[in-house]
């Protein structure tokens, strides 16, 4: 993460399961990130339009906008954003398209929390 004298990195978590956002907010908040969580991907993108952010962790399969659309919008709003897609619906062509569109990491559920923490820390250093 950034030096302690700087503002914390801003992390946005988007998952239609409220418990996921709640749990990840606790984990990453304790790690020093400023965390915003959303269960509605469209509201998350509207938030991104008005608020600076550094890293986005988004579920793939959601109502409104799916994870690929969130990735495209996040990169449009902030080309330097690091986006991590998490999904239980992984297909090789989905991962390939995500990387073509600039995803930082693509993780298949179920994954260990440690794996996500490592991915977010790598994104923080990128």
Image (cartoon, rainbow, N blue to C red):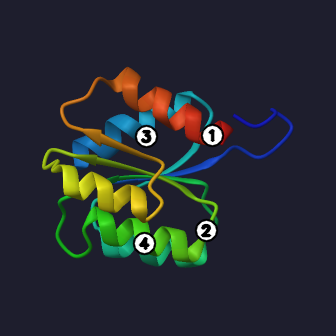
Residue count near mark 4 (Cα–Cα under 10 Å), binned few <14, some 14–19, many ≥20: some
Left or right of 5, for residue 13: left
Q: Position of residue 60 (x, y in %)?
A: 24, 57
The CA span between labels 2 and 3 is 24 Å
Q: Is residue 49 above or below residue 16?
A: below
Residue beneath the point at 46% across and 29% down = 117
Q: Earlier in the sequence, mark 4 or mark 1?
A: 4
Q: Which residue is mark 4?
A: 72
Q: Residues within 10 Å of mark 1 (few under 14, many from 20)?
A: some
Tell me which corner region of the image, top left, top right, bottom left or bottom right, holds residue 14.
bottom left
Which residue appears at 33% of the width and 75% of the height? 42
Going 15% across and 44% down the picture, which residue do you hit?
88
Q: In the rendered view, would you say 4 is above or below 6?
A: above
Q: Position of residue 115 (x, y in %)?
A: 38, 25
The image quarter containing residue 3 is top right
Q: Position of residue 61 (x, y in %)?
A: 17, 59
Helix, strand, or loop for circle 3? helix
Q: CA distance from mark 1 to mark 3?
A: 16 Å
Quick one: quadrant of the C terminus? top right
| Label number found at residue 124 | 1
Single out the mark in the foreground, 2 or 3.
2
Mark 2 nearby-residue class (10 Å; few <14, some 14–19, many ≥20): few
Residue 79's label in the rendered image is 2
Give the quadrant of the N terminus: top right
Q: Secondary structure at mark 2?
A: loop
Mark with earlier residue (1, 3): 3
Q: CA distance from mark 2 to mark 4?
A: 9 Å
Rounded to the nearest whole Å, what is the CA distance between mark 4 and mark 1?
19 Å
Find the distance from the CA under tag 3 to the CA under tag 4. Answer: 23 Å
């Amino acid at each position: 993460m950034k030096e302690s004298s700087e503002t914390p990195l801003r992390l946005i978590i988007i998952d239609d399961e409220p418990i996921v956002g709640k749990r990840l907010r606790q984990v990453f908040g304790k790690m020093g990130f400023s965390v915003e969580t959303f269960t509605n991907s469209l509201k998350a993108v509207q938030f991104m339009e008005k608020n600076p952010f550094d890293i986005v962790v988004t579920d793939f399969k959601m109502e409104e906008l799916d994870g690929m659309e969130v990735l495209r919008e996040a990169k449009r709003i902030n080309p330097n954003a690091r986006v991590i897609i998490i999904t239980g619906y992984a297909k090789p062509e989905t991962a390939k398209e995500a990387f073509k569109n600039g995803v930082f990491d693509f993780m298949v559920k179920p994954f260990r929390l440690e794996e996500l923490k490592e991915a977010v820390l790598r994104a923080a250093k990128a």
